[in-house]
Image: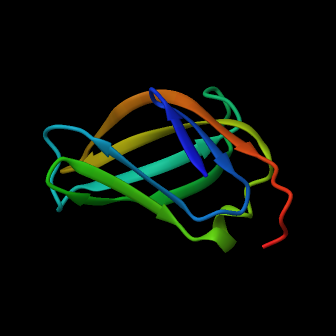
Amino acid sequence: MIIANGLDIICSYGDTFNCAWEIEGVSADDDITFSVKATANSSDVIHQAKCDVSDRLINVNIPAATFAEIPVGSYVYDLVLRSEGRVTTLLFPANLHIKAVVHSE
């Protein structure tokens, strides 16, 4: 289950993580990364995933087994565009809450 409240996301531990953002000015050739950290000021990245881009839609898809490597807890995430030697943050850090589930799949 994934619930979005503005840019904040609440999701179930161990599920496939698939989210999309609509942002103008991006193209399929852009290198966009979804990053997860404990806090915005933390230097340690907990997880990073390359995003796919179609028109203005940025999509990140993390398989369930990979997403299960991130423990239950509260984190922050952002999207970063790298293009032609430039680095551009596409959104400021937002909250990512991973909730425990009862099932064991």
* Residue at image point 18% right, 51% down: 84
The answer to whether 75 is drawn above or below residue 12 in the figure is above
* Residue at image point 22% right, 56% down: 30
Q: Position of residue 87 (x, y in %)?
A: 31, 40
Which quarter of the picture shows residue 81? top left
Q: Position of residue 20 (x, y in %)?
A: 37, 49
Which quarter of the picture shows residue 17? bottom right
The answer to whether 68 is drawn above or below residue 96 in the figure is below
Q: Position of residue 33 (x, y in %)?
A: 41, 52
Identify the colour scheme used. Answer: rainbow
The answer to whether 39 is drawn above or below residue 34 in the figure is above
Q: From the viewer's perspective, is 68 left or right of 28? A: right
Report the number of numbered marks: 0
Front residue (pair 14, 36): 14
Q: From the viewer's perspective, is 64 left or right of 53? A: right
Quarter placement of the C terminus: bottom right
* Residue at image point 61% right, 28% down: 40
Q: From the viewer's perspective, is 36 left or right of 49? A: right
The answer to whether 44 is drawn above or below residue 17 in the figure is above
* Residue at image point 36% right, 34% down: 89
